[in-house]
Amino acid sequence: MSIANMRWRNTTTDFGAVAKLFHWTIAAAFIGAYVAVYYVIWFTDDSTPEISWQLNLHWVLGLLVGALVLPRLVWRILSTQPDDVPGSRIEHLLAHSAHWVLYAFMIMMPLTGYIGTSAPTDFGLFTVPSFQHTSMFQALSATFNVTWEQFEAPVDAVHHFFGKWIVSTAVGLHIAAAMFHHLMRRDTVLTRMLPRSTDDIGQRRASEA
């Protein structure tokens, strides 16, 4: 599909270019953040300064997810959504619930990651200060008489527990479900989120038949 003919908005059969751009950018950043932090965990000594760029990459990608998920949600709410593929009512309910759970994780993980990190995040052109050094944390500290160490420890524990066990499982199930629909059900769940529209794919398959 050429740029001139690109459909920016969703239809009842396909996602538009804006939704696809949000989806794949967030997906790439989300997975990239996992790759960066697990590279640190598995292959480096996280007490050495040499790993600072890998952790900074993890923070950059995490904040990118957090910055994109809210406009992605607004776009979803204001846009037409493709019709559900054939399936039972419970399947549709589970699919919609799973999507909203993933949105919640895409808000929770960047939020807990940011407010539980004591170092600034360097984006190259600008730097985001650590939550520890913001006026918001100073106000929280004064109001509740809590030190950074007391605040950071439980937030960091929640971030690591959900990231290691809950969110990774949810993302894996999301990918597995998409592949199941594509390979077994052979419906449009995956193809309508690909860069090419489902109409283009359908026309190509028809010409090859």
Image: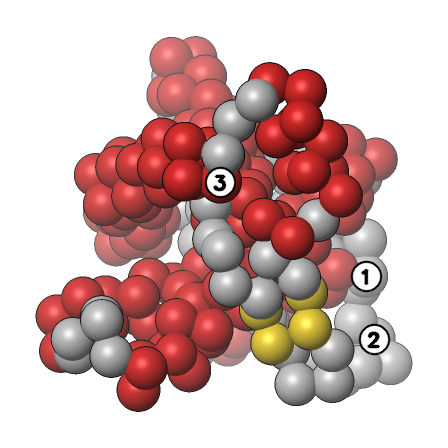
- Residue 38 as seen in the image, left or right of residue 124: left
Total marks shown come to 3
Q: In the displayed structure, would residue 91 be above or below residue 149?
A: above
Q: Amino acid at mark 3?
A: Trp
CB atoms of marks 3 and 2 within 8 Å? no
Label disc, if present, on residue 148 of the rendered structure:
3
Locate residue 121 relative to residue 27 in the image: left or right.
Answer: right
Label 3 – label 2 distance at C-alpha: 53 Å
Name the residue: 23% across, 45% down. Answer: 164
Query: In the rendered image, which residue does mark 1 sit on?
Result: 8
Residue 88 x/y as whole percent: 38, 17
Identify which residue, 174 or 186, lies in the foreground: 174
Instruction: Look at the numbered disc 2 and give the secondary structure of its residue.
Output: loop
Viewer-nearest of discs 1 and 2: 1
Q: Mark 3–mark 1 contact, CB under 8 Å?
A: no
Residue 5 circle label? 2
Determine crowd level at label 3: few under 14, some 14-19, many 20+ residues with C-alpha closer than 10 A: some
Amino acid type for the residue under numbered disc 1: Trp
